[in-house]
Image (spheres, helix red, strand yellow):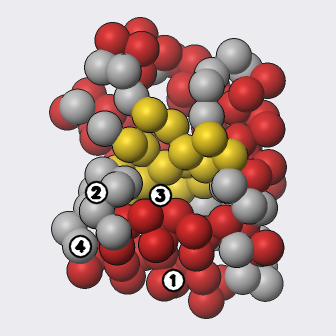
Amino acid sequence: MEIALIAHDGKKADMVQFLNEHRDILHQKKINLISTGTTGDKVKKAGFEVNALLSGPLGGDAQIAARVAEGKCQMVLFFRDPLDRHPHEPDILMLMRLCDVHNVPLATNPATAQLLIKAV
């Protein structure tokens, strides 16, 4: 199973904390992690194997959206910062739309991500 990880700057620490709290599940189920670039750097520093794509504003969100559309990515954990502006908002909306179109589970906060991870 492939899970995509994306976190806005103000949420990257939350993503790393979430992954650390669920490390056992991720290792037991042999989850393949992909991420946007900067999120991937933080996740790697926390000791996880992750395939980091481009940074979100440089096309990473679009790369993950393409993997969703191709059926390669089965879940997206996207810790969004709803209180900040993002210049790549069209890419974010495209990714969310494609998750809906292709019926791919999408969590936009740690509470929802926890429910999805426990269902794996």
**Residue type marked 3:** Thr
Q: Quadrant of residue 72?
A: bottom left
Image position of 4 with respect to 102: above or below: above
Q: Nearer the viewer, mark 3 or mark 2?
A: 2
Compare marks 3 and 1 and give the one earlier in the sequence.
1
Residue on which the image places disc 1: 93
**Residue type marked 4:** His
- Secondary structure beneath dot 1 equals helix
The percent coordinates of residue 116 (x first, y second) are: 29, 40
Residue on which the image places disc 4: 102
Residue on which the image places disc 2: 105
Disc number at residue 44?
A: none
Q: Nearer the viewer, mark 2 or mark 4?
A: 4
Give the residue at x 47% y 58%.
108
Q: Quadrant of residue 96?
A: bottom left
Disc 2 crowd, CA 10 A, few/some/many (<14, 14-19, 20+): some
- Secondary structure beneath dot 2 equals loop
112 to the left or right of 52: left
Give the residue at x 50% y 37%.
33
